[in-house]
Amino acid sequence: MIMGKGSNYRRFLLLWAGEFISSIGGGLTSFGLSVYVFRMTGSAAATALVALLAFLPVLLLSPVAGVFADRYDRCLLMILGDGMSAVGLVYILICMFSGEAKLYQICIGVSVSAVFSSLLEPSYRATVTDMLTKDEYSKASGMMSLAGSARYLISPMLAGMLLGISDVKLLLIIDICTFVFTVICTAIVRKNRLSKRSIIKESFGESFKLGWMAITEKRGIMILIIISSVITCFMGAIQILVEPLILDFESSRVLGIAETVCASGMLVSSIIIGIAGIRKDHTRILSISLAVCGLAMVGFGLKENMILICCFGFLFFFMLPFANNCLDYMTRINIDADKQGRAWGLISFLSQIGYVFAYAGAGVLADKIAEARHIGVGRGAACVIMVSGLLLAVMAVSIPFFRSVKELEGGTVNDKTIDNK
């Protein structure tokens, strides 16, 4: 059903506002638990373990969540995902009020929260496709990148300030409260939806198969997914090791300020993309942006110098939305709207497998390097980040040589808005 452009975009902005606030809350919890665990254990591996368990359930369940997104009410799935993910955080909070939360208790809490959070991503992305026209996809991707950047831009500085006057329990309470706002925004969008999808009658297995066919019928999409998986392995290193690197020689307050300064690069580029969009040369822009990200990672780990770290961190985050936008756009315009939930669930699973290897191995490797070279854990983390950045740059340079990837820029999805067809 073709919808009014203005009405749809306003509904998208309301949905986006809920995810923006939720992203800030999630960033507070992520920052607070990272500082809490590193100070409790002094281990980069322990910090990485918590991040891994907060991510792994989302990854493993994303294909199933994608099938759900095409079979059931997408907004309702988002409400359930946001609302129920607070359960794990409440458990951690209770443990902290009862005394110091143990590492295993934190691991249980973040895992439970992640299980419910797995419902969000496929439904959110597919709902955005439902609402908007093809011409609006690029700008919407910029807005979505901006919402995602909030956990890196706003949360760290805010968390660092709050930890100076309180402790991690306050951060968890704030995060739990943000779920209420997000659920309300999604409920309003659901209530004002102008049409509903027809009921899908095929079996769960058939739905899963159709999702697989949607991403494999074009060779270029599969190549993008494979490249993304390798890239996420390298990029996961800086995401998981930035806290141990800086906390090894600075306070949590300085860490929060540094993360905010670095992430402001993502804010700047997301605003640029949100206003202007990216209209052509997506393959070339993808390659250049990822190559610069890799070189920025090399510079990020050079010295224990906060000015140098912030400059290269800013550059890394500035280029990231360009890469994400290109990947999102080329994939979105080549998959039918009624298969997007299943497709995004599988794409999220396959393209982010690299994070599992990064989260599972980067912290352990940083600890081992530090022990072998008789240096601090922070410098061990820096070594892992620099090598990962170099490998990322090499991988990025190879992207334009894949002809099937370049062919995706034309797209096959009709330029019309389909609301839950």
Image: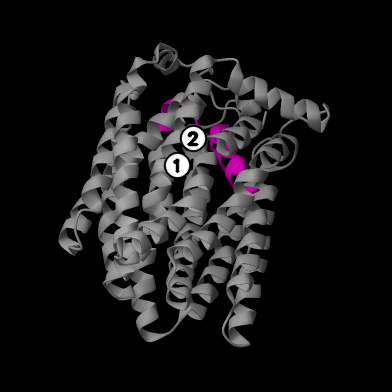
Residue 147 image point, x, y percent: 42, 51
Side of 164 where 233 appears, left or right: right
Residue 237 image point, x, y percent: 40, 50
Q: Which mark is residue 233?
A: 1
Q: Which residue is labeled 2 in the image?
A: 229
Q: Secondary structure at mark 1?
A: helix
Q: Amino acid at mark 2?
A: Ser
Classify mark 2: residues with Cα within 10 Å, few (<14), some (14-19) or many (20+).
many
Q: Is residue 40 visible?
A: yes
Q: Check the image and report above or below for 50 versus 389.
A: below
Q: Quadrant of residue 97?
A: bottom right
Q: Front-most of 67 and 128?
A: 67
Residue 1 image point, x, y percent: 63, 26
Residue 67 image point, x, y percent: 71, 35
Query: Which quarter of the rendered picture does the C terminus lie within?
Result: top right
Confirm or deny contact between disc 2 and disc 1 (CB under 8 A).
Answer: yes
Q: Is residue 136 visible?
A: no
Q: Residue at x 74, y 40 (%)?
A: 72
Q: Residue at x 43, y 63 (%)?
A: 44
Q: Residue at x 45, y 42 (%)?
A: 233
Q: Amino acid at mark 1?
A: Cys
Side of 105 where 284 appears, left or right: left
* Magenta segment: 118-139
Q: Front-most of 185 and 6?
A: 185
